[in-house]
Every structure is written in C-alpha cells, then in structure tokens.
Amino acid sequence: MIDPSLSALGAQVVVASSGDEHHPPENITDGNTKTFWMSTGMFPQEFIIRFAEPTNISAVTVDSFSVKNLKIERNTSQNASEFEPVTEKDFEQTEGHLQANAISLNGSSATTHLRFIITSGYDHFVSVHRVGVQH
C-alpha cells in the first residue's frame, strides 16, 4: 500500500540543503502534488525524511520536476548521522509534466530516516512535489 501523505504518518523533512519561503521542504510530505519544495540551484541538493517510528519500506514514489539523478540512502537508528546507500536512479526528462518514479528499496528493513540526494538536474533548479512510501 502506498501512503499518499507522509505527514499523516508523522513523517517530516528534518533537513533540506536549500529552502524557499514560498516552497518549503515540508511540502514534500503533504501528499499534494500542487505544492512542492524547490532547490535554490547548484548540486548536489538533499533532504532527509524522518519517520515517527521505524518503518519497513519496500519502495518509494517520487513526483518531481527536472531531477536528472537521485540517490537514496537509509538510516536505521534514531540518530541520523550514519546512512547506507540503498539505490540510485536516473530520471527521464519530461516536458511540461511531473516526473513520476517508483523506486524499489530492495526489501529495506526498519528505516527511521531516508536521505534523498539529487546529484544533478536538467535545469539549475529542481522541485520535489511528493514522496510516498510503499510498505
């Protein structure tokens, strides 16, 4: 089952490498693709989502715009200091509509944090509209 709103599960963005007062990082978890977080240019860009409790996640969905390459890392402790790589994906460029990607986390175990690292984009600025998780 895919959760449309991570914020309803108590998940929140606890770190973002950039921010814009009109497009804040918490828009990533609100489940609404009309709201979004926008980077302020330069790469890499990253954000970390913390879950309210350890959560088994088999896949994530990412709705974005102009993201070229994304790495996902996970953490299984309450301290978000040590992450292990899970996967990396190149996104197709889309013209005029969102990139919708489902990404397998290869049977990831109880995760407390997910770090998303955008290593490159098709433009100087990228946006992430929604992240969902599949249990």
Image (cartoon, rainbow, N blue to C red):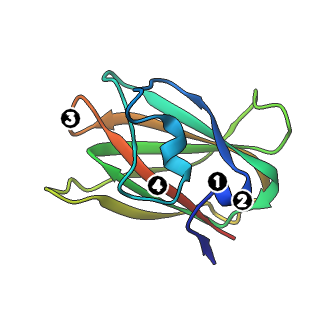
State the residue at coordinates (37%, 30%): 39
Label 4, label 1: how far apart the Cα atoms are: 11 Å
Q: Identify the disc placed on residue 57.
A: none
The total number of labels drawn is 4
**N-term-proximal mark, 4 vs 1:** 1
- The first of marks 4 and 3 along the sequence is 3
Dot 2 falls on a residue whose secondary structure is helix
What distance separates the C-alpha of mark 1 from that of mark 2?
Answer: 5 Å
Q: Nearer the viewer, residue 44 or 95?
A: 95
**Residue at label 3?**
123
Distance Cα–Cα, label 3 vs label 1: 28 Å
Circles 1 and 2: CB atoms closer than 8 Å: yes
Question: What x and y, as percent, mark residue 28?
Answer: 50, 47
Q: Is residue 48 above or below residue 97?
A: above
Distance, label 4 to label 3, CA atoms, is 19 Å
State if disc 4 and disc 2 touch (CB < 8 Å): no
Q: For the residues marked 2 and 3, what is the alpha-carbon distance in whole angstroms? A: 32 Å
Contact (Cβ within 8 Å) of mark 4 with mark 3:
no
Amino acid marked by disc 3: Asp
Query: Which badge, 2 or 4, is on the more N-terminal residue?
Result: 2
Crowding at mark 3 (Cα within 10 Å: few <14, some 14-19, many 20+): few
Residue at point 69%, 71% (across, down):
135
Residue labelled with disc 4: 130
In the displayed structure, would residue 56 be above or below residue 26?
below
Labels 4 and 1 touching (C-beta < 8 A):
no
Rendered image: mark on residue 9: 2
Q: Which residue position is annotated with label 1?
A: 7
Question: Marks 4 and 3: which is nearer the front?
Answer: 4
Circle 2: residue type: Leu
Point out the tag, 3 or 1, that comes first from the N-terminus.
1
